Amino acid sequence: SDVCSSDLWVAELQRLWREGINFKALPWNLKPKAVSTGAQATMLMICVEPLLPAHVLSAVGSSAEESDSQSESADGLAEYRLQAHALGDCNLFIVRNGKMIRTFPMADSAAFAAPPHVFSSIVKDAVYADKFQHLDDRCQEGDLLVACTDAIGLWAMQEYEAGRQVDWMRYWENDEAWQADIQHFRTLPAGDPRRMRIDDCTLLLLQVVAETNEESEREILPDRSD
């Protein structure tokens, strides 16, 4: 429902954007962009939720087959429901044991060539809800969820299509490696298949970990010192 109501809150964000700009004070070279182009943004939303165990489903009168919900994968790892909603060309890669097993919403590198749908700060009465793409899948304990902007997404997709796995964990808590690799791939010669487009490069790494109730179930005793 939040995705479907996006058209309403976009109008409010557009109003706030306009109010935050002093158009009279803008340099001459920035005024055309502010008036005719405005700001544009893509969006990728991710939600990971635990699946109900079979014995819980039985207690509420539903079978595992009917609900298509299991709490563990075939190899005994905890499973989760993964939902994602995307507008534009931000991309999600699902990586398991170092190998990419799913990509969303872009299916291949060629898809990045098409102009993406974007939120606009100045286009009035635009309808965005029907432009969203949706994913409802599963992920499991240990999976790495890689969310990135289009320059990173295109580069990574080309790496996968060439049979090369991307070592995303190299960048986990290692900003220096991230900056060094961005600089390296951007400065490769024109025509090099591994060259990265010079554009915004934003990367978010999320790892799925099994839930623990140890902290939440610990009894909190009142402070009787007073």
Image (cartoon, rainbow, N blue to C red):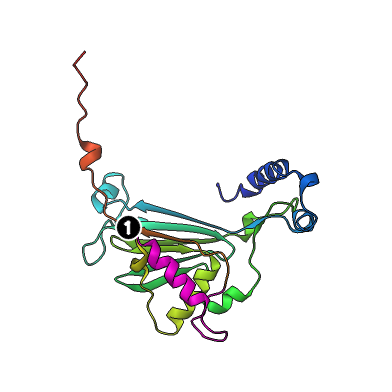
Measured from the top left, where is residue 166 in percent x and y?
38, 74
Residue 181 is one of the magenta-drawn residues: yes
Residue 24 lies in quadrant: top right
Q: Which of 131 and 71 is in front in this view?
A: 131
Q: As displayed, is residue 209 above or below residue 201? A: above
Which amino acid, mark 1?
Answer: Val
Q: As displayed, is residue 140 above or below residue 22? A: below
Residue 91 is one of the magenta-drawn residues: no
Q: Residues within 10 Å of mark 1 (few under 14, many from 20)?
A: some
Q: Residue at x 30, y 54 (%)?
A: 63
Measured from the top left, where is residue 55 in percent x and y?
23, 50
Measured from the top left, where is residue 210 in percent x and y?
26, 54
- Left or right: residue 64 versus residue 225 is right
Q: Which residue is drawn at 64% across and 63% down?
A: 117
Q: Is residue 88 visible?
A: yes
Q: Circle 1 — which element?
A: loop
Q: Can residue 69 be seen in this view?
A: no
Count of numbered marks: 1
Q: Which residue is drawn at 43% across and 72% down?
A: 181
- Left or right: residue 11 versus residue 224 is right
- Left or right: residue 33 versus residue 170 is right
Residue farthest to the top, as pictured: 226
For the record, the magenta segment spans: 173-197
Which residue was labeled with disc 1?
A: 208
